[in-house]
Image (tube, rainbow, N blue to C red):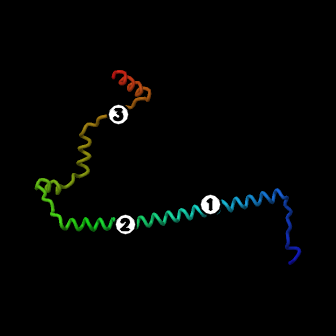
Amino acid sequence: MNEEKLIHVKLDFADALESKKNVLEIERGFMQINNSIENFNALRMNELKMKIKLLGKIREVSQIIRGLKKFLPEPKMPKILMEEKHEAPKPVQQIQKMQKQMPVKRIIEHKSIDEQIRDIQSRLNSL
């Protein structure tokens, strides 16, 4: 090796000790992060397995329902209900016109908080 490439740095014992502490703290932080990532991955895999199981159960229930529909008789609906069912929905303009004709009632009056508190207090006193 060439003497020119070597660089020497003198550190005090306290500085060296502090640097070692910092390096160890950083290493501990990395290990905690790695542990958290591994826990997350394990939980994520567990979640995905549970979702797959749930999907399988949903498919089973769906097949059972389809099978039941084949065996169960169809309910007989009265003609009145069938006619209502086939009735076309009203156009949006007609609904808006009806809304304009209906009177709008104000349910809540805007009062200050103090007035509302006094009103409640007076109702309580009357009871």
Horizontal arrangement in the rendering, residue 106 relative to residue 39 (left or right): left
Work out whether 126 lies above or below 50.
Answer: above
Which is nearer the eye, 25 or 83? 25
Tag 3: amino acid: Ile
Is residue 51 found left or right of 35 in the rendered image? left
Residue 8's x, y, as percent?
A: 86, 67
> In the rendering, at what x and y percent does residue 127 appear?
33, 23
Q: CA distance from mark 3 to mark 2?
A: 47 Å
The residue that mark 2 highlights is 55
Q: Residues within 10 Å of mark 2 (few under 14, many from 20)?
A: few
How far apart are the alpha carbons under marks 2 and 1?
34 Å
Amino acid type, callout 1 = Gln
- In the picture of the structure, the residue carrying the numbered disc 3 is 108
Relative placement, left or right, of 27 versus 80 is right
* Neighbour tally class for label 1: few under 14, some 14-19, many 20 plus, Cα within 10 Å: few
Q: Is residue 122 above or below residue 71?
A: above
Please give the name of the residue rendered at 40% of the width and 29% of the height, measured from the top-left corner: 111
User: What residue is disc 1 on?
Assistant: 32
Q: The N terminus appears in which quarter of the rendering?
A: bottom right
Q: Is residue 37 above or below residue 107?
A: below
- Give the left or right position of residue 95, taking residue 79 as reference: right
Expressed as whole percent of the image width and height from the top left, the position of residue 81 reads 14, 54
In the rendered image, residue 6, in percent from the top left (x then y), is placed at 85, 72
Q: Nearer the viewer, residue 30 or 76?
A: 30
User: Residue at the spot x=23%, y=48% of the render?
Assistant: 94
Label 2 is placed on what type of residue?
Leu
